[in-house]
């Protein structure tokens, strides 16, 4: 949900789910960490707002739960079909550019995977708000296990 589409009153009024928000968001965070990297960004945005929950947060949480309900068949899969010599370690990363309107901070996302011609095994992923204001964004990084970093 884009911050530009938000009603100013909704940013100030306490949300109806404020008392239950922490419990719901932590359950969604568990799901994101275990097998749903597609919701990691949304969950992180909501987790940062638990102590100051507003009506906008209610709307965002509703949208996240609806997405999970309608995409419940989406599962993280991996497949292995190559010899060890054909496998590479790949790190994919991306960053937004000043997507938080209140702080102008960016968000970084990465996924570390083992890849090959017939192999894809995600090992770990993260989505994190950067600690400083960025003036540029990295769009793609690909590291191979046999190349020096």
Image (spheres, rainbow, N blue to C red):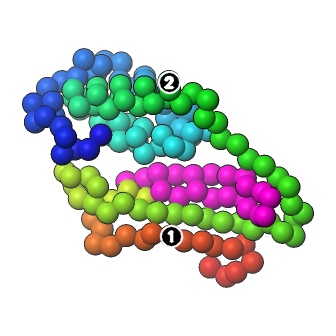
Q: Report the side of 57 relative to 64 (left or right).
A: left
113 in relation to 149, above or below: above
| SS assignment at label 2 | helix
In the rendering, at what x and y percent does residue 43 appear? Answer: 42, 38
Which quadrant would residue 4 be assigned to in this image? top left
Judging by the rendered image, the residue that carries numbered circle 1 is 140
23 in relation to 89, above or below: above
93 in relation to 41, above or below: below
Q: Report the side of 130 relative to 90 (left or right).
A: left
Residue segment shown in magenta? 109-132
Q: Which label sits on residue 69?
A: 2
Which quadrant would residue 44 be assigned to in this image? top left
Indicate whether residue 30 is drawn in magenta.
no
Give neighbour class at mark 1: few <14, some 14-19, many 20+ (Cα, 10 Å): few
Residue at screen point 63% across, 59% down: 112
Residue at screen point 27% across, 65% down: 133
């Amino acid at each position: 949900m884009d911050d530009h589409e938000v009603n100013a009153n909704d940013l100030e009024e306490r949300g109806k789910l404020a008392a239950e928000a922490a419990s719901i968001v932590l359950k969604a965070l568990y799901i994101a960490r275990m097998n749903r990297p597609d919701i990691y960004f949304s969950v992180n945005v909501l987790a940062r707002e638990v102590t100051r929950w507003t009506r906008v947060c209610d709307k965002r949480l509703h949208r996240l739960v609806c997405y999970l309900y309608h995409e419940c068949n989406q599962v993280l899969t991996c497949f292995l079909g190559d010899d060890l010599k054909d496998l590479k370690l790949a790190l994919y990363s991306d960053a937004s550019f000043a997507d938080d309107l209140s702080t102008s901070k960016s968000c970084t996302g990465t996924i570390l995977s083992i890849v090959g011609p017939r192999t894809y095994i995600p090992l770990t992923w993260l989505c994190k708000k950067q600690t400083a204001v960025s003036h540029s964004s990295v769009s793609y990084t690909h590291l191979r296990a046999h190349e020096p970093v």
